[in-house]
Amino acid sequence: MTFFDSFLVRAALAGLGVALAAAPLGCFVVWRRMAYFGDATAHAAILGVALALALNLSVMVGVLVVVLIAATVVSTLSNRGYALDTLLGVMAHSALAIGLVAVSFLSGVRIDLMAYLFGDILAVGKLDLVVIWAGAALVLALVAWRWSALLTTTLNADLAHASGIDPKREQIILTIALAIVIAVAIKVVGVLLIASLLIIPAAAARPFARTPEHMAIFAMAVGAVSALGGLFLAFQFDTPTGPTIVCLATACFAVSAVLGGARAR
């Protein structure tokens, strides 16, 4: 018996990998006020699941492709006069509905929709673990490589232009990183809860961060505590694992908000 034969060890490592990759991206989502963007693209992932099963492809590949297409469509249409929140609202609900309808047409294919909607971290296998950590490493490397450019673009697009940085290119890089996180996280927390791991740890870290780098590190710590602590609590109290992870992250945010408010006084 090896270390990775325990389903709890695999679940803990999977949750840790997703939390570490999602946290720095969540900081950019919070800074750019893109919370609904992350939520909407996560909803689109269920359509990717349906298409992957219909075409006999890897679910992760299907999710990745659909999320990238959805993000591109929204970015394109937002430059043609449509309000961004309207486009995201249309895409989030229509992609989720189309995906659920498409799944119902798949004859001979039985899938656990609840697992894709809310995640099933306890069912993570060794191959899933490799994919999750490979995706997390790729995202972390991408963010580390483009950190200064992404930060400059987030602060001021004109300043980015003056510094020789293309804001559109940085937006595409950020979108690709978000799509990778959603694709690798779908089995851990599901499409309905992915956005929470992006946003809540970053929001919880914000009151105590003095620099953007500090906020990213704090967010990674909050995400890791939420993933590992949520898994422990779910095992102890026999509760749904994905939602329990999110509940613990929410508790961290509540404590942070109270302490941050007291500190500001």
Image (spheres, rainbow, N blue to C red):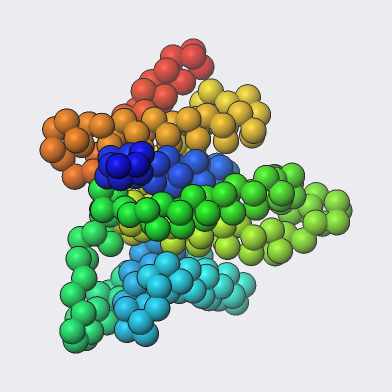
Residue at 58% x, 26% y is 209
Observer-nearest residue: 244 or 6? 6
- Percent across and percent down for residue 253 are 38, 30
- Percent across and percent down for residue 223 are 43, 36
* Left or right: 225 in relation to 106: right
* Left or right: 134 in relation to 124: right
Could you tell me if residue 218 is visible in this image?
yes
Q: Give the tally of numbered discs.
A: 0
> Extreme front residue here?
1
Which quadrant of the figure has residue 100? bottom left
Residue at 69% x, 58% y is 170
Observer-nearest residue: 219 or 258? 219
- Percent across and percent down for residue 132 are 45, 53
* Left or right: 10 in relation to 150: left
- Percent across and percent down for residue 219 are 50, 34
Q: Is residue 28 above or below residue 180?
A: above
Q: Quadrant of the N terminus?
A: top left
Residue at 36% x, 23% y is 255
Q: Is residue 56 above or below residue 159?
A: below
Residue at 51% x, 26% y is 207
Could you tell me if residue 11 is visible in this image?
no
> Extreme left residue here?
238
Q: Is residue 51 above or below residue 96?
A: below
Observer-nearest residue: 178 or 88? 178
Q: Is residue 34 above or below residue 86?
A: above
Observer-nearest residue: 244 or 121? 121
